[in-house]
Image (cartoon, coloured by chain):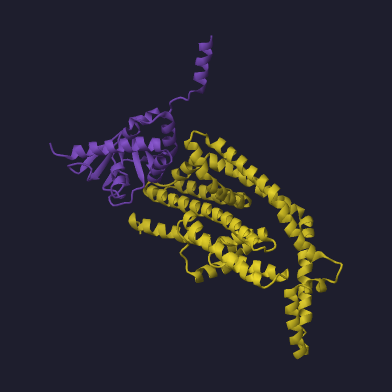
Amino acid sequence: MANAYLNWLKQLLSKPQKNSWLRNYHIFKDLNSFELHLIHNCLHKRNYHAGESIFEEGHPLEAIFFIVSGEVQIKGKISRDGIAILNQPQFIGVIDLFHENTRNGTAVALTEVSMLVLTKTDFFDLIRLNPRLGNKLLKSCCHFICNSLLDTIPE
Amino acid sequence: MNWTKLAFILLTLALIVLGLVFYRPIFTHLLFAVIFSYILDPLITRLEYHRVPRWLSVLLLYGVIAGLLAWFTIRLVPELVRQGNTLLALLQSSDKPVSQQILNLPFIRSINTFLLNVDSQIPSLNLSQKFVALIDTTKMQLGELPKLLIHNYQAVLSTVSFVATIPLISFFILKDKQALRKGILSLAPNRYFELILILLNKVDETVGRFLRAMLLEVISVSIMASIALSIVRVPYAILIGITAGVANIIPYFGPWLAATIAILTILVNGYPPIMILYVGLAMYLVQVVDNNFVYPVVVGKTIKMHPLIVLLTVIAGGWFGGIIWMLVSVPLVFMIYSLVKELYVNLRQFRLL
């Protein structure tokens, strides 16, 4: 009987993991549900038509784009051959964010694209205001940047 | 352009115009509510990061502010009322002829003696008589002040309701800050999205930091000036201290205004002239502490505007909307200037200009 009440209370108090899908993105994979809720609060949804420019090389960087659906083509210093096609659950802008604060490539939507946007200001505010969350985010960013670096080294 | 799109744009524009006309009376409420929200937002956000829901954080903070206001009312308002009443009693006393009462004040007496001397040299001028008439008029107008408040109780009530509405609007702005922000940004076209993000963040940072810094500065200068003036035993120290704090918003000229009021109070109350030196020294010390410790810490950087531009802005503000605009014109012009500068830099960077 007591267990039944306890389970009922647990069910009542536990929030559904409605933002757990965000863990598909590499830099959010270690975050708990509350931290994902904070991230979700800061995300803006954007839709792009096929062929529409998302950003151009040399533009100031203020947003990190997380691809939800569709394909994005990047031309620039992103890979050895200077061109890359990205799709869900990849993201654009983290390397430039820690590099020169300007875009190193041009992004164009190849198909109808839906993306989530996290602003640079919100990203650094999240790190500053919640060091625990910041630690996880920065660790994931380091991991992602290292992997990207290793990919560019010729075998 | 197809006709459906044109009709939709025209309909939207018409609705915007109608909306602006309909909601015009609450623009001032909204403006003050936004200012209030900017001041409180960092605390609410900090609490949110400690797992306190935003609505609860706002209510908790309102509770703290209400508590502080109650404490302030209990501790300081009786003293302020006493100081104000003493001034009013001086202006309203009727046991002696008015002019005689005020002319007995040492500072006024010396001016009157000087004017009498001038009159004896040039009898047709009648300067002394005009001076007494001027004092009479001023006294009558100041003495009418409490009656004016009673007669305009409707205006007083509407002011009270205005003040009460602001926390209510602020509650919703603070609670749904992210949703409002997302709503505004969803209207931005993709081409200008990052530019609008940068500008919005700049507005947020500049306005928020400036308003919070100003509030902290007003409070700190009011406290410091009240303490300094109380130490040198200036009458109405708290009233003048608070005036000094508020006037300090105007760079360069604000501090002089408060010092002038303090010196005039000393002269009118017949205190020894050496007190002027003490007041000058006290106000100077307050300014030294403010300029070297408080301002650099709370504002970070000073308003880099030429004194002449500040003076012209203050005068223009005064002509435009009275004392309130004199106070807000300089920070407002500075904020608009820094935003236009930021817009220009970013338009160049995005190769839109």
Tell me the quadrant of the picture where the C terminus of chain B can be found: bottom left
Q: Which chain is yellow?
A: B
| B211 sits to left or right of A103 | right
Where residue B209 appears, as percent x and y from the top left, is: 49, 52
Residue B53 point in image, percent of width and height? 52, 34
Q: How many marks?
A: 0
Residue B64 point in image, percent of width and height: 61, 41
Quarter of the rendering containing residue B344: bottom left
In front here: B15 or B133? B133
Nearest to the observer: residue B344 or residue A16: A16
Is residue B136 shown above or below B46? below
Residue reaching furthest left? Answer: A155
Question: As drawn, which residue projects farthest toward the top?
Answer: A1
- The hue used for chain A is purple
Q: Position of residue B103 (x, y in %)?
A: 78, 74
Work out whether residue B27 or residue B241 is closer to the camera in this orientation and state it: B241
Horizontal side of residue B98 vs B349, given as left or right? right
Q: Residue at x 75, y 52 (%)?
A: B154
Occupied quadrant, residue B346: bottom left
Residue, x 23% and y 40% (percent of image)?
A84
**Residue found at x 54% / y 39%:** B175
Q: State whether residue B97 is above or below residue A30.
A: below
In the rendered image, the residue lying farthest to the right is B95
Residue A69 seen in the current view: no
Using residue B345 as the reference point, say whether residue B89 is left or right of it. right
Can the viewer see residue B76 in this picture? yes
Q: Is residue B112 above or below residue A10?
A: below
Above or below B267: residue B154: above
Q: Residue at coordinates 52% horizontally, 60% vertically from top-left? A: B289
Of residues B14 and A22, which is closer to you in this image?
A22
